[in-house]
Image (cartoon, rainbow, N blue to C red):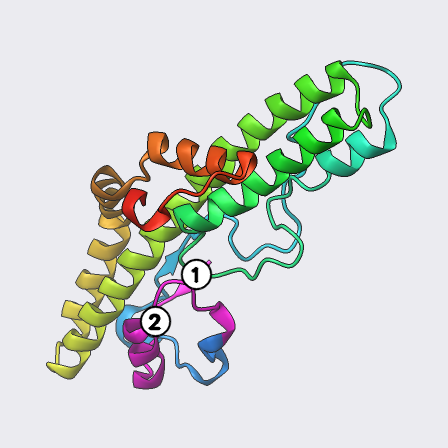
């Protein structure tokens, strides 16, 4: 959950944030909740973006005896991958392709080296498809929430500075709550990731082919 705050420091931070910046860059400890104006805080659900424990159930093996290598590869498909910094705006298409394509490349290498069976290879690839869908949708939702949150922070700051009354701010808070999901959906309609381009980018990483990500993303 996230809250819009009255403190101008936080407002400016939110407005000035750029994609890829980490949540820790915004010092929420100095913020003052808008309770005096809104009656209660406006909270935004940013999916499970800032929850430490995430999903790790993308691969379902068919056989009874699963090799250690196959298990190791399956464990790489985490909602919060090791060594990857969490950002408010979610993964970009390039980051997704590098993450997913990299795992796919390791799966292919393990199969070629005889470290995993044909069935394990099939199960891992099926799991990677599920992981790709999940991570892509998650990144899109985070990206949309980040964008709308910045817009709302700027609008909230402007209303406060304009001297809006307590009733006006309370009505505004209620409107934000009512329209939040609608704004997210509208943003996603226009800014969803190009699935075809993403698959090509993932394949490029997986096969080692050089493609221009900037031209495709």
Seen at 48% across and 68% down, the residue is 22
Looking at the picture, how far across and down is residue 51, in whole percent?
A: 59, 54
Looking at this view, is 113 or 202 the one in front? 113
Q: Is residue 4 magenta?
A: yes
Image vertical order of residue 210 relative to residue 42, above or below: above
The residue at the point 38 percent across, 76 percent down is 33
Query: Looking at the image, is 161 positioned above or below residue 121?
Result: below
Q: Is residue 14 above or below residue 54?
A: below
Which residue is rendered at x = 23% and y = 43% of the image? 182
Write down the region rendered in magenta: 1-24
In-front residue for pair 158/38 = 158
The image position of residue 215, as x and y in percent, is: 28, 46
Q: Which residue bears the numbered disc 1?
A: 88
Dot 1 and dot 2 residues touching (CB under 8 Å): yes
The stretch drawn in magenta includes residue 56: no
Residue identifier under label 2 = 17
Q: Is residue 19 above or below residue 217?
A: below
Bin the neighbour count of mark 1 within 10 Å (Cα to Cα): few under 14, some 14-19, many 20 and up. Answer: many
Instruction: Tell me if residue 61 can be seen.
Output: no
Q: In the image, 79: left or right of 194?
A: right
């Amino acid at each position: 959950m996230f809250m819009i705050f009255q403190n101008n420091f936080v407002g400016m931070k939110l407005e000035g944030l750029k994609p890829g910046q980490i949540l820790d860059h915004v010092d929420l400890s100095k913020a003052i909740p808008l309770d005096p104006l809104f009656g209660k805080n406006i909270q935004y659900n940013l999916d499970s973006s800032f929850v430490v424990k995430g999903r790790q159930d993308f691969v379902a093996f068919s056989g009874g005896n699963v090799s250690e290598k196959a298990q190791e590869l399956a464990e790489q498909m985490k909602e919060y991958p090791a060594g990857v910094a969490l950002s408010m705006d979610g993964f970009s298409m390039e980051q997704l392709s590098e993450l997913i394509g990299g795992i796919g490349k390791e799966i292919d290498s393990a199969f070629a080296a005889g470290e995993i069976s044909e069935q394990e290879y099939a199960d891992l690839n099926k799991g990677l498809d599920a992981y790709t869908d999940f991570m892509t949708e998650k990144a899109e939702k985070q990206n949309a929430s980040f964008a709308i949150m910045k817009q709302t922070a700027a609008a909230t700051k402007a209303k406060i500075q304009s001297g809006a009354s307590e009733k006006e701010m309370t009505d505004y808070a209620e409107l934000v709550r009512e329209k939040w999901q609608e704004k997210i959906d509208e943003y996603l309609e226009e800014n969803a990731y190009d699935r075809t381009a993403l698959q090509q980018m993932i394949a490029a990483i997986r096969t080692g082919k050089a493609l221009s990500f900037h031209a495709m993303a």
